[in-house]
Image (cartoon, helix red, strand yellow):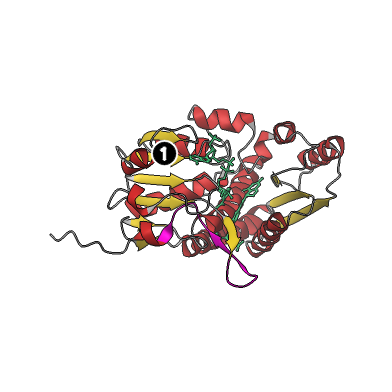
Amino acid sequence: MSEASTEARIIDGKAFAASLRGRIGEQVAGLKTRHGLTPGLAVVLVGEDPASQVYVRSKGKQTLEAGMASFEHRLDASTSQETLLKLVAELNADPAVHGILVQLPLPKQIDAEAVINAIDPAKDVDGFHVINAGRLATGQKSLVPCTPLGCLLLLRDTLGSLSGLEAVVVGRSNIVGKPMAQLLLGDSCTVTIAHSRTKDLPAVCRRADILVAAVGRPEMIRGDWVKPGATVIDVGINRVPGEGDKTRLVGDVAYAEAARVAGAITPVPGGVGPMTIACLLANTLTAACRSAGLPEPELI
Ligand SMILES: NC(=O)C1=CN([C@@H]2O[C@H](COP(=O)(O)OP(=O)(O)OC[C@H]3O[C@@H](n4cnc5c(N)ncnc54)[C@H](OP(=O)(O)O)[C@@H]3O)[C@@H](O)[C@H]2O)C=CC1
Ligand SMILES: Nc1nc(=O)c2c([nH]1)NC[C@@H]1CN(c3ccc(C(=O)N[C@@H](CCC(=O)O)C(=O)O)cc3)C=[N+]21
């Protein structure tokens, strides 16, 4: 065998997400005709962060396309914590709402942890509530954070069984890195969580059969940090200057370099991002079925 490298397989998150949304749509249609139940997702946006507005718009559109009800609440950037907690309490009590997502980051005057933990855990489709985080960590039935769940589905689709593989997750946030590590452990990987204090990060990354980058630093992970043949999942979404006065999106991985070494890699855009929204819809469907005492959908 020659050592000449071939380009990595591109993991098409956009296509996978579209097919997942199709299956979700079919299940939603069945719920409506057989049980008169329409899953509903409420998204709360505080302030006018342009990136958040883009995500909220595409979530709303895809929610409706899947046949679900979408409730959008846009609050002023100066909204008090008390007002936001009151809205969360109303959504908790509303039987038409099965999923609640409060878009992060929140303005400085609001304690995000308090808001997240005020959401009914059964409606916490982000999976950020301490109850859901604890259930995931102890292997109990929970609602699983959408981005790591999306990454896991792409990995299973690419590799089949993950059992015994070396996984390195770069990033230890509560919304991506930590739950990603829990899910990989649940699939019997040997998991390392790396972060800003990790010594010799390139060497740690080079051990990985599965390398998940969730750092928030544009193209930080270089091609020579990747083990030949590894599967690379790039969670990063970074807007950087493009041609002229345009901007473009790049991940946390130097894609062109890494693609020459990896066995398979997710692009940005079109990789993990679309999976996040598809998994949000999947969680909303799951929450609606559980609330009605119906069997859970088989989507995966
Ligand atoms: N595709 C999608 O759907 C989503 C994408 N994202 C994107 O994923 C990325 C990560 O998001 P998130 O987890 O919220 O980010 P956070 O900023 O919360 O966490 C970043 C993590 O990266 C670590 N880190 C920062 N700098 C370095 C470094 N130089 N070397 C090693 N580790 C480092 C930090 O370490 P420490 O803890 O030591 O500070 C921290 O644990 C962002 O680009 C974000 O936009 C996020 C959510 C969804
Ligand atoms: N409570 C909460 N839950 C979240 O899940 C959450 C959040 N807050 N705050 C912000 C991050 C970020 N996030 C993304 C979702 C979709 C894309 C996505 O669809 N990206 C497209 C490109 C979109 C574009 O062009 O801007 C892609 O990668 O192909 C990206 C990022 C969810 N987040």
Mark 1 secondary-structure assignment? helix
Determine whether, in the image, residue 16 is placed left or right of residue 203.
Answer: right
Kindly indicate the quadrant of the structure image that contains residue 2. bottom left
Q: What stretch is highlighted in magenta?
A: 242-255
Residue found at x 49% / y 26%: 138
Q: Nearer the viewer, residue 109 or 58?
A: 109
Badge 1 crowding class, 10 Å Cα cut-off, few under 14, some 14 to 19, many 20 or more, is many
Position in image of residue 77 (x %, y %): 83, 48
The spot of residue 280 in percent (x, y) is 60, 50
Which residue in the rendered view is the most extreme toward the left? 1
For the residue with label 1, is its CB less than 8 Å from the closest atom of ligand 1?
A: no
Q: Is residue 30 left or right of residue 81?
A: left
Image quadrant of ligand 2? bottom right
Q: Could you tell me the amino acid type at mark 1?
A: Leu
Q: How far across and how far down the image is residue 95, in percent?
A: 76, 44
The quadrant in which the N terminus is found is bottom left
Q: Say which of 107 and 163 sits in front.
A: 107
The answer to which of 220 and 175 lies nearer the viewer is 220
Q: Name the residue under label 1.
A: 184
Residue 33 highlighted magenta (yes or no): no
Closer to the camera, 254 or 142?
254
Q: Which residue is drawn at 51% across and 58% down?
A: 20
Residue 88 image point, x, y percent: 79, 39
The answer to whether residue 140 is seen in the rendering is no
**Residue occupying the point 43% across, 49% down:** 221
Dominant SS in magenta: loop
